[in-house]
Image (cartoon, rainbow, N blue to C red):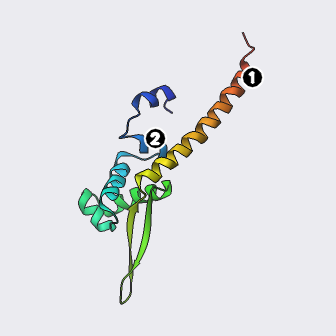
Amino acid sequence: MKSIKEAISRLNCDNILECFFGLNQSDVSLYFLLLSSGEMKIDEISKVLKKAENSVYRSLQKLMLAGIVIREKKIIEGGGYFYVYRAIPAREVAEEMRKLLSAWNKKMSEAIEEFERKYGGAK
């Protein structure tokens, strides 16, 4: 586990999604592709990123689990269907990160207070 000091010193706009949602750089690149391109099918994503579809699918799964990408089923006239993937707008993701940060800050403040109560009198 990284220390908070180390995490703060490394934090920048490029890795904030990694920090908040446990993503890797490939996942983040895929999110930004969808953010700039709108909805895309997995084969289209695969071609643009030059990655195998199963690798793209794993990243999509992580992004959907994080709640920053959604999948929509499209019906093909005459039968069948396919899925398209779309990024949640950055403004909404930023708001979710603010909520997570607030909840984390509250929990950490409580933990620090408990630490101080428990060990504050020790010399």
Q: Nearer the viewer, residue 80 or 1?
A: 80
Q: CA distance from mark 2 to mark 1?
A: 30 Å
Across and down, in percent, residue 36 comes to: 30, 56
Type of amino acid at the residue the image marks with label 2: Cys
- Going 49% across and 56% down the picture, which residue do you hit? 67
Mark 2 and mark 1 lie on one chain; the one further toward the N terminus is 2
Q: Is residue 94 left or right of residue 39?
A: right
Residue that lies at the very extreme toward the bottom in this rendered image: 78
- Going 41% across and 56% down the picture, which residue do you hit? 89
101 over 77 or under it: above or below = above
Task: Give the tally of numbered discs.
Answer: 2
30 over 13 or under it: above or below = below
Q: Residues within 10 Å of mark 1 (few under 14, many from 20)?
A: few
For mark 1, what is the residue?
118
For mark 2, what is the residue?
19
Q: Secondary structure at mark 2?
A: helix
Q: Nearer the viewer, residue 45 or 36?
A: 36
Across and down, in percent, residue 15 comes to: 38, 40
Give the quarter of the image for residue 34.
Answer: bottom left
Q: Residues within 10 Å of mark 2 (few under 14, many from 20)?
A: few
Q: Nearer the viewer, residue 101 or 112?
A: 101
Give the quarter of the image for residue 53.
Answer: bottom left
Across and down, in percent, residue 102 comes to: 58, 40
Give the quarter of the image for residue 35.
Answer: bottom left
For residue 20, the mark is none
- Going 70% across and 22% down the picture, which residue do you hit? 116
Q: Secondary structure at mark 1?
A: helix
Residue that lies at the very extreme toward the top in this rendered image: 123
- Going 39% across and 83% down the picture, which residue do you hit? 80
Type of amino acid at the residue the image marks with label 1: Lys
